[in-house]
Structure formats: C-alpha cells, structure tokens
Amino acid sequence: MKYKLIIFDLDGTIWDHEDISSLTPPFRKISKNTIVDLRGTLVKLYPYVKETLSKLKQMGFILAIVSWNKEKIALEALDAFGLAGLFDYYCIEYHPYKEKMIKKILKKIYEEENEIKSFQVIYIDDRDIHIKDIAREVSGIYFIHMWIDVKNYKDLLKLIKTIT
C-alpha cells in the first residue's frame, strides 16, 4: 500500500508571521483566522488553510509539520488556531536542519506503520533554502514552493490533486 505524506512548514507558509518563536505566549484567538500574543502582536492564518488541511485529511493524506521554531511556542500557536488536531506528526526543533526533521518524521511513521513500503512525500515551504539538503538526504520528495508554485491555498489543493 502506498501512503501519501504532506509535510508543511509553519512560518510564512501556514501563517503570516516569519518567526513565531519570537512571540510571547499565551496566544488568544481574536477572530477565526487571527491570534494575538501577550504583547499584542497579531498572527494571521492564510486564507483557506484550515479548510485545505481538513480536505487533505478527508482525502486520506498523512499530514505533518517540520519547522525551525521553539516547539512549545509553535504548538501553542497551532492550538490557538485550532489546527493541532489536523496534523498526524510534527517535528519542531530550533535549528535549520529540516532534512534531519523529515528523517525523524519518516522514522516515526515506519516504526508505527511497519507495513508501509513506500511514500509519496510532498514538502511545502515558503522558502527553498532547505530543499537541496532535503533532496540530498531524503529521496522521493516533491517540493511545492508556497507563493511561487501556487498563489494561495485553493491553488495548493488543486495542485496536490493533480500530482497525486
């Protein structure tokens, strides 16, 4: 059986803030797609993020997060947005080595689902600075450069349907 795994970056990909780790929890939700930290800094989800993630789950995708952030702060933001339950796996660490984080996610999945033979892995990030290292360390990654390859989450969903 072939499983489909989609890995998302957070900063600049899921929400508009470029460094959620620089903010001060607790976060408070002030609208459907906006949270605010203790100092009054606003963070907005990009339009249709939650709907897209929900649709991908309904389509049977395994969803994961790989993010260069402080885990506790990023998880609090995800929880405040109501997104935490949509992801099956996450690796949020305070270093830039996303290839190592992806390998950890794959190892967790292999350990939990030992019948998995192969993956189709899609990696979505707003920056392409990590992709060479990821491609060198992990084979079979299809990279979607958010805001370059697609302009919004509706386009992202269309592209994913096309390539899977």
Image: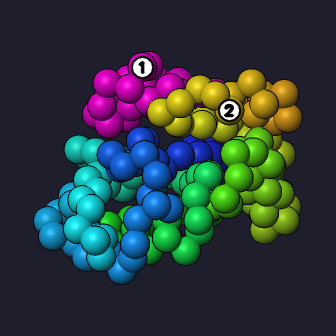
Determine whether, in the image, residue 155 is placed left or right of residue 11: left
**Residue at the image point whose x is 59% and y is 26% from the top:** 128
Q: Position of residue 79 (x, y in %)?
A: 40, 73
Farthest residue, direction left: 31
| Marks 1 and 2, how far apart at CA | 15 Å
In this rendering, the answer to whether 21 lies above or below 96 is: below
- Report the residue marked by disc 2: 130
Looking at marks 1 and 2 on the same chain, the residue that comes earlier in the sequence is marked by 2
For the residue pair 58 and 41, the one nearer the viewer reads as 41
For the residue pair 139 and 164, the one nearer the viewer reads as 139
For the residue pair 104 and 155, the one nearer the viewer reads as 104
Q: Does dot 2 land on a helix, a strand or a loop?
A: loop
Q: Identity of the amino acid at label 1? A: Ile
Q: Position of residue 93 (x, y in %)?
A: 67, 60
* Residue 47 in sight: yes
Q: Which mark is residue 148?
A: 1
Which stretch appears magenta?
A: 142-164
**Residue at the image point whose x is 49% and y is 70% from the top:** 73
Q: Identity of the amino acid at label 2? A: His
Farthest residue, direction top: 149
In this rendering, the answer to whether 134 lies above or below 5 is: above
**Residue at the image point whose x is 29% and y is 52% from the top:** 45
Q: Is residue 105 magenta?
A: no
Q: How many residues crowd mark 1 within 10 Å: few (<14), some (14–19), many (20+)?
A: few
Identify the image quadrant of the C terminus.
top right
Q: Position of residue 27 (x, y in %)?
A: 32, 75
